[in-house]
């Protein structure tokens, strides 16, 4: 196996949106293929037509493309083992089914659903597990494709196998039973189709979730029937909800992965965060670029315990990735999330202020919605009492504002910066009994808000003329 070219795959079912648990499986498979200069295959497992949701295949591809998890073979680009959509591979499954029939490891199901139901009820009454193999017919009919085709377990035995993450695993004979390979509608079951595809496509490493451990003996028995060595299994731990005691799922609020794109997360940050939900290369470093992740990733370091989803940690990590962008990229993205009427010179001046208050681009929209930037674009109406600092008289406040205007007028427009404005105002403030006598009314005159950035920043963004105009209005 070690001499083979590494081939991994992501094989989702088109039954709705893709959430973070699915994506992490794809990510680990992708990272391992890229780490080893191997092949990463996208395969669509659409044999359960009743559960298929229209548009899901496009959604899967869009999700992976946003995250940059490019595939080497797949439905839209083809490859040596095309087609890569299972419903288009029915003849291949029939060919492999015939191999099992010829070997005596497959037979047409002779029973109706009612008869199987009776067998099941009898087992329940006897308080025994229902095993179809106990009702296997002695003689097999010829399969005419009108009845389900069942797999005959080659040997009823205990199974032991090695998982790269979990080490040696085992299961008793109760884990083995005759299961359906191909349904009466002509479509293969997952238990059969994915094995055939992995054999055909030369998959060397199968990355999947813990829920498949109990079915692994069945899969191994199919490989054994074909006389083929199975691929290596890499079983990932679950992603737990924020409570930490339940697996994150669609039912429990796991979001569509593309919701994170809509909310303004960087794909590199999401990749970085997901990689560390179950994997740790060691050391204190937490912020990794995509290339760095590829270099440090090792399937042997995937952890067994479930990792808890934490929005705060994702937001922190996303901000760290934003910091890696150039000033031009940050400005461009923030302006894109501002309304058109704010995409002007003042909007550009607001970029550093907005940047300090966001962890993702979507936060810009939230700031706008809350009206926290409105005062930069229009004068605020406020009660004159708001200008008063403690018990200072109106006349004193008015005189102080006049002194501020006179001092600010001395600053040339091209030098109207935070540093120069602060020097002027603090010089005035330091000569008073309390700095608040100046700073409070100035801040309120400029913003009209109880809470706002400091007046030096506001004044620079507004510019000299607008600042003086608002101070005059306050007087």
Image (cartoon, grey):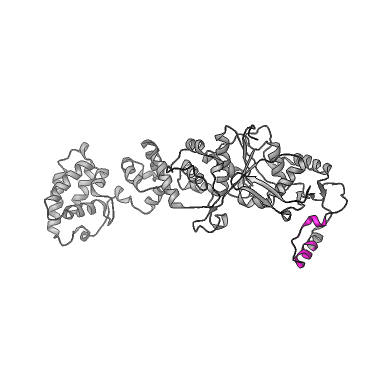
Q: Nearer the viewer, residue 390 or 290?
A: 290
Residue 121 part of the magenta-drawn span? yes
The answer to whether residue 133 is left or right of residue 328 is right
Task: Please say whether residue 1 is visible from this viewpoint.
Answer: yes
In this rendered view, identify the residue nearer to me: 470 or 411: 411
Rendered position, 253 above or below 316: below
The quarter of the displayed image where residue 92 is located? top right
* Residue 174 pos. (x, y %): 73, 56
Q: Is residue 244 above or below residue 339?
A: below
Give the x, y percent position of residue 89.
Answer: 72, 40
Give coordinates of residue 374: x percent, y percent: 32, 51
Quarter of the N terminus within the rendering: top right
Count of numbered labels shown in the rendering: 0
Query: What type of secondary structure mainly makes up the magenta span?
Result: helix
User: Residue lying farthest bottom?
Assistant: 125
Evaluate whether residue 146 shows in this view.
no
Nearest the eye: 67 or 157? 157
The percent coordinates of residue 251 (x first, y second) are: 57, 57
- Residue 119 as seen in the image, left or right of residue 379: right
Magenta residues (range): 118-136
Q: Nearer the viewer, residue 367 or 344?
A: 367
Taking the spot 21% from the left edge, 40% from the top edge, the residue there is 416
Residue drawn where x is 68% and y is 40% of the image: 198
Determine the residue positioned at 20% across, 45% down: 422
Is 397 inside the magenta-drawn segment? no
């Amino acid at each position: 196996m070690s001499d083979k070219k590494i081939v991994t795959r992501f094989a989702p079912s088109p039954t709705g949106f893709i959430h973070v648990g699915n994506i992490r499986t794809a990510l680990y498979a992708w990272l391992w293929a890229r780490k080893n200069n191997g092949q990463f295959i996208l395969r669509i497992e659409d044999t359960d037509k009743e559960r298929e949701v229209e548009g899901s295949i496009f959604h899967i591809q869009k999700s992976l493309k946003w995250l940059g998890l490019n595939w080497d073979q797949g439905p839209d680009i083809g490859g040596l083992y095309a087609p890569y959509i299972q419903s288009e591979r029915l003849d291949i499954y029939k060919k492999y089914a015939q191999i099992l029939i010829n070997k005596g490891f497959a037979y047409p199901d002779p029973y109706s659903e009612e008869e199987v139901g009776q067998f099941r009820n009898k087992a329940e009454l006897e308080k025994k597990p229902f095993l179809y193999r106990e009702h296997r017919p002695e003689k097999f009919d010829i399969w005419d494709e009108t009845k389900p085709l069942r797999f005959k377990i080659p040997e009823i035995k205990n199974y032991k196998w090695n998982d790269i993450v979990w080490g040696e695993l085992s299961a008793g004979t109760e884990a083995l039973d005759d299961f359906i390979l191909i349904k009466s509608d002509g479509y293969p079951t997952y238990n059969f189709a994915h094995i055939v595809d992995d054999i055909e496509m030369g998959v060397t490493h199968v990355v999947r979730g813990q829920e498949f451990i109990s079915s692994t003996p069945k899969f191994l028995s199919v490989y054994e029937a074909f006389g083929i060595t199975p691929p290596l299994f890499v079983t990932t731990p679950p992603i737990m909800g924020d409570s930490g005691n339940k697996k994150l799922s669609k039912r429990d609020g796991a979001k569509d992965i593309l919701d994170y794109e809509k909310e303004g997360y960087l794909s590199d940050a999401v990749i970085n965060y997901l990689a560390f939900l179950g994997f740790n290369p060691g050391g204190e470093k937490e912020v990794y670029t995509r290339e760095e992740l590829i270099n440090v990733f090792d399937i042997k370091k995937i952890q067994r315990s479930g990792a808890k989803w934490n929005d705060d940690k994702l937001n922190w990590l996303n901000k760290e990735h934003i910091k890696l962008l150039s000033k031009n990229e940050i400005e461009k993205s923030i302006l894109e999330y501002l309304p058109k009427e704010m995409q002007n010179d003042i909007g550009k001046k607001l970029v550093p202020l907005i940047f300090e208050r966001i962890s993702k681009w979507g936060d810009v929209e939230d700031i706008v919605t809350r009206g926290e930037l409105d005062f930069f674009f229009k004068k605020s109406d406020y009660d004159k009492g708001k200008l008063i600092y403690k018990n200072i008289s109106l006349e004193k406040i008015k005189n102080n504002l006049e002194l501020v205007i006179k001092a600010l007028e001395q600053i040339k427009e091209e030098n109207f910066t935070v540093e120069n404005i602060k020097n002027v105002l603090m010089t005035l403030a330091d000569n008073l009994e309390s700095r608040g006598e100046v700073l409070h009314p100035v801040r309120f005159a400029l913003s009209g808000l109880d809470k706002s950035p400091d007046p030096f920043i506001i004044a620079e963004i507004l510019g000299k003329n607008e600042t003086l105009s608002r101070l005059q209005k306050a007087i």
